Amino acid sequence: MSVPGQVIAVTVLGQDRPGIVADVTGALADLHGNLEDSTMTLLRGHFAMVLLVRTGAGVDAVESALRHLTADGSLVINARVLADTAPGAPSGPSYALHVHGADRPGIVATITRVVAEHGGNIVDLGTRLGGDLYVLMAELELPDVAAAEALERDLRIVADEIGVDVHLSPVEDDLL
């Protein structure tokens, strides 16, 4: 179903509690907003969500509809209009990247720099620190299949240098 209107990005940050997703999406549904893309996670008990909603209501109406959720200061919500672009087709084959090892500064910067040098585009990334173990999980798109072999070789070189393990595997993305 196509909903007329503009695309508004809404970010929500704050202390986690049950019902935040229901409260935010319910307020947007009351504006006849259609959620087009969204992501949400908990970061050490802190709620973080970004969503794109298409609505005929303006950004002021969206902020007003969500304002009651920020009244106690536990959440910060921002909204802004985005350029209306169609979802992009993948630029190339998708791969899952898993990195784990002892925690140290610079793991994400080092690994993602190698991906960028091979023309890879990171489309999703998450990290977790559990004790001394650091885990990075990412989905990335590469320009072509040949780039995967070279990327994996170079990732293994830097992984050895920084003391982490790295695994790159193709993603079957039939569902998207």
Image (cartoon, grey):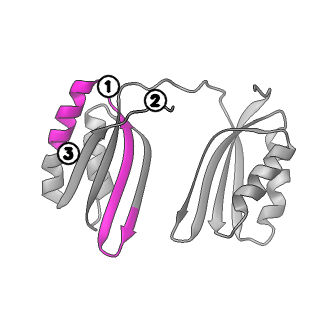
Q: Which residues are magenta?
A: 128-155
User: Residue at horizontal 62%, vertical 25%?
Assistant: 85
Q: Who comes first in sequence, dot 1 or dot 2?
A: 1
- The local crowd at label 2, few if under 14, some if 14 to 19, many if 20 or more residues have their Cα within 10 Å, is few
Q: CA distance from mark 1 to mark 2?
A: 18 Å
Mark 2 lies on residue = 174
Q: Is residue 132 a member of the stretch shown in magenta?
A: yes
Left of 160 or right of it: where is 20?
A: right
Q: Who comes first in sequence, dot 3 or dot 2?
A: 3
Q: Is residue 74 visible?
A: yes
Q: Position of residue 17 (x, y in %)?
A: 68, 70
Mark 3 lies on residue = 155
Task: Say above or below: 57 vs 27.
Answer: above
Q: CA distance from mark 1 to mark 3?
A: 16 Å
Give the SS element for disc 3. Answer: helix
Q: Are marks 3 and 2 in contact (CB under 8 Å)?
A: no
Give the SS element for disc 2. Answer: loop
Residue 50 bears which disc, if any?
Answer: none
Q: Who comes first in sequence, dot 1 or dot 3?
A: 1
User: Residue at horizontal 25%, vertical 33%?
Assistant: 118
